[in-house]
Amino acid sequence: MHPALQHPLAINRREFFSRGVCTIGTAALASLLAQDGFASASSDAPSAVGGLAGLPHFAPKAKRVVYLFQNGGPTHVELFDYKPRLKEMHGQPVPESYFAGKRFSTMTGSPQGKLMLSPVEPFAQHGQSGAWVSQFLPHTAAVVDDLCFIKSLHTDAVNHAPAISFFLSGAQLPGRPTLGAWLSYGLGSDTQDLPAFVVMTSVSKGTTCGQIFYDFYWSSGFLPSRFQGVKFRGSGEPVLYLSDPDGMSRPMRRGLLDDLARLNELKLRDFGDPEIATRIAQYEMAYRMQTSVPELTNFSDEPNHVLEMYGPDVRQQGTYAYNCLMARRLIERGVRFVQLMHAGWDQHGSITTELYNQCRDTDQPSAALVTDLKQRGLLDDTLVIWGASSAARRFCRATSTTGRNGAAIIIPTPSRSGWLAAGSGPA
Amino acid sequence: MLRFVVACAVALLASKPAFAVADQPAGSPVHFGRQILPLLSDRCFQCHGPDARQRQADLRLDDETAAKTPRDGAAAVVPGQSEASELYRRIAAIDPDERMPPADSRTPLSADEIALVKRWIDEGAAWSAHWAFERVVRPITPQPGGFAERVQNPIDAFVFARLAREGLTPSPEAPRETLLRRLSLDLRGLPPSPAEADTFLNDPSPDAYERLVDGLLASPAFGERMAWDWLDAARYADSNGYQGDGERTMHPWRDWVVQAFNGNLPYDRFTLWQLAGDLLPESTPEQTLATGFCRNHMINGEGGRIPEENRVDYVMDMTETLGTVWLGLTLNCCRCHDHKFDPVTQRDYYSLFAFFNQTPVDGGGGNPQTPPVVEVPSVEQTTRLSQLAAEIDSAASALDELELIQFPRGEGQSTADSEKAASAPDAVKAILKLPSAQRIRGQLEELETQWAKDLPDYLPHVQKLRATLDARDAANRSIPRVMVMADLPEPRQTFILEKGLYDKPRDAVSAAVPVNLPRLPAGAPTNRLGLGEWLVSPDHPLTARVTVNRIWQQFFGVGLVKTPEDFGVQGERPVHPELLDWLAAEFVESGWDVKRLCRLIVTSSTYRQSSRVSPALLERDPDNRLLARGARFRLPSWMIRDQALAAAGLLIGRMGGAPVNPYQPGDLWADITFDRKHFQQDHGEALYRRSLYTFWRRIVAPSLFFDSASRQICTVKHLRTNSPLHALTTLNDVTYIEAARAVAQRVLTGRAVEPSERIAAVFRLVLTRRPTAEELSLLTASLERLKREFAADPQAAARFLAVGEAKRDESLDAVEHAAYTALASEVLNLDEALNKE
């Protein structure tokens, strides 16, 4: 545990996390705002570009973040929040204490008259930490000793979009900078070839209720727009307008940009506007991205055992597995904040079928990312967060007794579980 | 939580005045509003300010009486006696337990600031309101220092007097070519055409510049240019936003805005119509249409949302938009609590909210045409509808006549009485009793089913009538419906909502304006109309200041107050306070004449200065707040596109109408909406309309615009970043390659023959001026190389020329055309092309 995180936790752990991502953001920010900065933390580290003078204030442990955002409501009680009493209460009506005097979302209605359901898959303890994980997540179970499970998060929002906005920006309404934007703003970038804050999205196969990815999930809010997340697209070119027009060769582009720079230098000499110098540099960066981005997405240099670790979808652009490997490749190249969002965790009526698909799509790649980062020594200074905006409680409909025949429903509740992986042990 | 965010915002972004102290002549008394209030606001108000709930020790420093009233024997401020003033004692205290602000606030006062407070108290502790809440009094125009011969109008007198005080000199006037391009872009958003350039550059008359300005102001493109910023403020879009993101049809309102600017509708009426056009006596349809402004907010159709919660969100959005656009105040803080810095309470917020809380709008369902709406058919649609009405009449009478033959019956009997109809069910007989013109679609279908077999000659006539009805319904559906304002007959009770939550109503409030601002004008009704009249009453301290500042920002890239959204205590103090007030007074007295204000600004010497900057001036005034030079800043991305289309001769000047979808790479909509929405690119003219008419999908804005407002909430501050992603857009987007090809074609088919003349012509189409000798030699070398490269690979030239849908003149040599296209692309990407200079 890093001292920067330890301090607020020591005061009051429950309070700390109940405040949600803003406080986590503060802590993460604090832990990243190292005294010597990335520029001088070690002599071989590349210099940070941009960022605020005087930041970080103290030596950081984590330098980069991968946020594995699970859009929808992963049902924590099926995954890693083991509740033995659910099994005991299986088939009993939902107790009155659960719903009396409470208000439920109009979408799902009150659980009154519905029956309790025991976990669909059995739970077991894993690793040295003895963390409980269900059989839905065998790969995550294998890396629990690298994870810290947090089961006490809370939002007030019943809908996905406001809740996601809250977890990413600290406010339910769009308009605030998100975590990645704050980090790019405060700390700058460790790479001159790629943006500091990259976002990728994916959807589970055969999902019935995907949630839209709004661009305010990676907005820079009131910060300048260069700090907003750059969304890599899930199909075709990952960055818009990356390719030269048809018929223009690379040498021709190079020549044109050189000529352009010469003309702009004349203008700079004549007019003295420093923005011209920035523009020359940004055109150069654009040229470099035209090379660095295709190189980034070319997996041919990955050994087979690494590709296999992420699972069979890894070669298919736009999948969660592909994005997880991309996250590692981005982190490796000095990208500060990778926000990976996966939709489909919203199984309103089909938990016994879709949750299997959902876990199959995400369990192995998530665990592989942690392992891969660890094997390369990158987990020492990379914080991996797995979390969602909502969780889900499940009940049978009153007409069903088992819930295993597709009759289960889930109800989004204003709480969630998630895990953090950072450093050599639990964060 | 919220506090954290607010604190972050304040700590990181609070706008410190660039030259707050320097705008005071030396030796003058301490100015409370400019020098003391900002300190108190910054360091003290968080705990001792307007917000009663956060107030510590029951001490408030934002109120003169409270601060000067003795408490426990000591007043915070004792005029003339700093040593007896608790405020001074505490900020100067050495004991850390006594000292204010507390050590953990991290915002200590500097020794200079403490001394300033001491001096202010000793000078008598004169108090005044925050400058922006004081009535505008037109300042006396000062002597312009040593630059009298440069003064064109009072703007220059204010600016030059200040420059003289700062020991600076105004820059010389920019060259005529620069001025022409600057004016044309500023007033039309388009570059001058070569013919316009020839006319102006060869016009020796002394008033050539003024006549140019008048011509540009009279151009219909002026309204299109002005509309863009207003659409940002009005959060105009062509879809709802949120999940589903249904398409709406608000574009007649957008067209109204363009017309209003072109017709120079005075800003007071512009304001009244948009806030309360429906409530004006004998309101016209146009005035009601204008209220679409209020309804441009996002609409949430997400399942599970509670309609009332949505409805409250919409009313809040209207209230806060009013706050930003007219008051320049960040009202949104007051949803949950009294403002931390400005004298606006939570009660004030919900009292303003009450004005907008009277509509019959239903918060449920997410209908992108949620009533109340007005239908705004185009001329073509109106014609089509009357044609269809005539066709329905003739089809119905044809059917009636046919039934006389097909259904024989006695005199005075109906079709239903015919022998032939005897076996028909009663329901069908009931239909037959009706004249054909009164039968509705479903009834015609029933007739078709009934007689399909027995009367094959009859059937087609019924079908014909039904098809015509269908055509009319389809035409009706295609009529744009603009969401507008209306008030309920019985007022809806408004409550203060605890923490802004729709289901936590607390005290009831009635519609009222904030207590610390002027009262509603005498006789004004307590509804939106009264609210509008209040905003544009001559003694309102904010509306005129906020408006002239926004318009100034349009020309200089940054306002006289650089926080156009915040004129409150945390906003920037104006760098030229007297100029701002003079412009505000002038604007109101001119009858809120927007064109006149624009004319005043662009005819000033201040505006006409060259934007060249010396290293010394750059160091002294990096952001050009003192205006010792002309403005130089990157054009908005929409204007960069329009400029390219105009230079290419591709631009279609047709105004208004339904939005269009020009080029976008791939299907960006599918990606973000899980295949629910698919981008369908238009073809032909729609590719070359002005950017203003591009379909604006709120959850995924057009990809070719960068640094644009998202159009999700009201935005009045321009964003200008300098990113490699922008470079990729203007280098590679088909829009720009196609425009470059058309520029090249224009030049290659024009009069110039020599390469140097052709290069100069390309340059001139984009930049208005001719290249310098040095530029020309670089461009010539560039062209030579490009020709060689394309000559070596003619297929590449052909592929390069095939980018974009506009037809190419095939008679042009492909290698030459390709080389000039690449050269034109280079020119379109010059820093100068991307900038207003």
Image (cartoon, coloured by chain):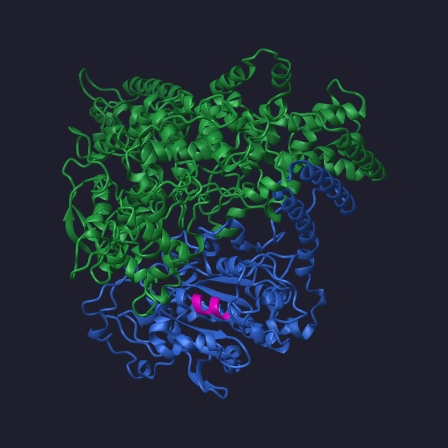
Question: In front here: A161 or B8?
Answer: B8
Tell me which residue sits at (42%, 35%) in the image.
B550
The colour applied to the residues of chain B in this rendering is green
Which residues are drawn in magenta?
A25-31
Residue B830 image position (x, y, % from top left): 67, 37
The colour applied to the residues of chain A in this rendering is blue
Query: In this rendering, is residue B303 above or below B126?
Result: below
Tell me which residue sits at (78%, 36%) in the image.
B797
Query: In this rendering, is residue A145 above or below B668?
Result: below
Query: In this rendering, is residue A326 above or below A305?
Result: above
Question: In front here: B559 or B706?
Answer: B559
Any part of residue A201 in sight? yes
Residue A248 image position (x, y, % from top left): 75, 42
Any part of residue B657 in sight? no
Question: In front here: B351 or B486?
Answer: B351
Question: In front here: A151 or A88?
Answer: A151
Residue B99 image position (x, y, % from top left): 32, 65
- Which quadrant would residue B560 be assigned to in this image? top left
Residue A66 image position (x, y, % from top left): 53, 67
- The C terminus of chain B - image quarter: top right
- Which quadrant would residue A23 be assigned to in this image? bottom left
Secondary structure that dominates the magenta span: helix
Magenta region includes residue A168: no
- The N terminus of chain B - image quarter: bottom left
Tell me which residue sits at (39%, 75%) in the image.
A8
Q: Is residue A53 left or right of residue B37?
A: right
Can you name the residue that lies furthest to the bottom here?
A128
Query: In this rendering, is residue B151 above or below B206?
Result: below
- Which quadrant would residue A332 be assigned to in this image? bottom right
Q: Is residue A78 left or right of residue B192?
A: left
